[in-house]
Image (cartoon, grey):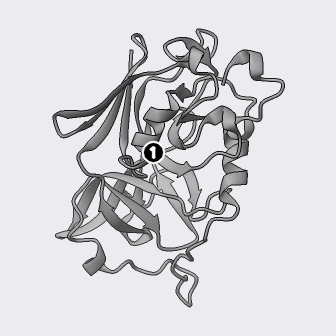
C-alpha cells in the first residue's frame, strides 16, 4: 500500500480476513483413534505430478529441516488458516523410502522468505499439479508477465514497494485469492507466500498482488511491498491464476 495511505487504510491481510469469514470451510480428515494422523489414500496422490498443491490430512502439519523424523522442526502449519480457509501447501519435491513416497518437500510461507522444509507424506493429500501458468514480476522495470508454458498471455505495468519497503525478491506462490472489501485494492486480489519488510502489518506483512483505486501509482515504487496493477488487468488474472500458481519476483 502507499505510505501516504497508511494511517487511513487497513492493511492487506486485515481485508483478507473480512473477505474470507463467510467462505465455506471444508473439513479436513479426522485423526486416527490413537491420536495419530490418518494416512492419505495413495490412490488420490500417486497420479499427481510435482510440483503440486496439497491439503493437510490432519489438523496441523509439522515441518522439519530434513526428511527424517529426528530432524529439527522449523514450523507448524495449521490445516485451517486464520481466515478459516483451508491452508494450501505447495509441494515442490519428494523423497522415497523402500519404493514408497515417504516425505514431501514444501515451501514454507513466512519469514525468512524462501524457506523449504519436509513433511511426512502421510500428513498431506496431493490435490492437483501446479500447471504451466506462472507470473514473472520484474521489480526494476515494474512489469508483470503471465505466461503459459513459453507463451505470454498477459503483460502489464505494475507498482511495487518503495525503497524503504521493497517488494521481496524470490520464488513464491499464490496462497489465497479473494474479492477485497475495500475499493483501494481493486476488484480482485491474490495473497502470495511472500512477506514484506514492514513487520507492523497484521499477520506479519504478507505481500499481495491486487488492483487499485489509484491507477496513477502504476509503474512507480509506491507500496509497502504489495504489487498493484490496473483493475482491468487483475480481472483478467482472476480467471487465469489459481491457488498454487508460481510467482517469480526478480530484480
Residue sitting at x 60%, y 64%: 80
Left or right: 140 as drawn, with respect to 207: left
Please identify the residue farthest to the front as the structure is shown.
232
Q: Is residue 44 above or below residue 73?
A: below
Where's residue 147, x and y in %?
26, 35
- Residue 73 can be seen, yes or no: no
- The local secondary structure at tag 1 comes to strand
Residue sitting at x 34%, y 66%: 126
Please identify the residue farthest to the bottom as the structure is shown.
33
Q: Is residue 196 above or below residue 161?
A: below
Left or right: 5 as drawn, with respect to 137: right
| 17 vs 118, nearest the viewer | 17
The number of numbered discs placed on residues in the rendered structure image is 1
- Residue 132 can be seen, yes or no: yes
Binning the other alpha carbons within 10 Å of mark 1 as few (below 14), some (14 to 19) or many (20 upward) gives many
Quarter in which the C terminus is drawn: top left
Where's residue 64, x and y in %?
46, 52
Where's residue 159, x and y in %?
52, 19
Quarter in which the N terminus is drawn: top right
Residue sitting at x 55%, y 43%: 188
The image quarter in which residue 226 lies: top right
| 238 vs 133, nearest the viewer | 238
Q: Which residue is mark 1?
A: 174
Q: Is residue 33 above or below residue 25?
A: below
Amino acid at each position: 500500500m502507499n505510505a501516504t495511505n497508511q494511517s487511513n487504510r487497513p492493511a492487506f491481510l486485515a481485508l483478507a480476513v473480512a473477505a474470507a469469514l463467510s467462505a465455506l470451510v471444508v473439513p479436513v480428515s479426522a485423526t486416527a483413534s490413537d491420536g495419530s494422523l490418518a494416512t492419505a489414500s495413495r490412490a488420490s496422490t500417486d497420479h499427481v505430478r510435482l510440483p503440486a498443491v496439497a491439503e493437510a490430512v490432519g489438523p496441523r502439519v509439522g515441518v522439519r529441516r530434513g526428511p527424517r523424523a529426528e530432524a529439527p522442526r522449523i514450523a507448524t502449519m495449521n490445516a485451517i488458516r486464520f481466515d478459516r480457509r483451508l491452508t494450501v501447501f505447495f509441494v515442490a519435491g519428494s523423497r522415497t523410502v523402500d519404493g514408497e513416497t515417504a516425505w514431501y518437500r514444501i515451501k514454507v510461507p513466512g519469514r525468512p522468505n524462501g524457506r523449504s522444509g519436509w513433511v511426512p507424506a502421510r500428513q498431506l493429500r496431493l490435490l492437483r499439479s501446479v500447471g504451466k501458468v506462472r507470473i514473472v514480476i520484474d521489480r526494476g522495470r515494474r512489469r508483470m508477465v503471465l505466461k503459459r508454458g513459453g507463451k505470454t498471455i498477459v503483460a502489464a505495468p505494475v507498482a511495487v514497494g518503495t525503497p524503504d519497503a521493497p517488494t521481496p525478491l524470490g520464488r513464491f506462490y499464490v496462497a489465497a485469492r479473494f474479492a477485497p472489501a475495500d475499493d483501494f485494492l481493486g476488484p480482485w486480489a491474490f495473497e502470495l507466500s511472500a512477506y514484506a519488510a514492514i513487520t507492523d502489518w497484521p499477520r506479519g506483512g504478507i505481500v499481495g498482488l491486487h488492483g487499485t483505486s489509484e491507477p496513477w501509482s502504476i509503474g512507480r515504487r509506491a507500496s509497502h511491498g504489495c504489487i498493484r496493477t490496473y483493475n482491468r488487468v487483475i480481472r483478467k488474472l482472476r480467471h487465469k491464476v489459481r491457488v498454487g500458481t508460481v510467482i517469480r519476483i526478480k530484480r
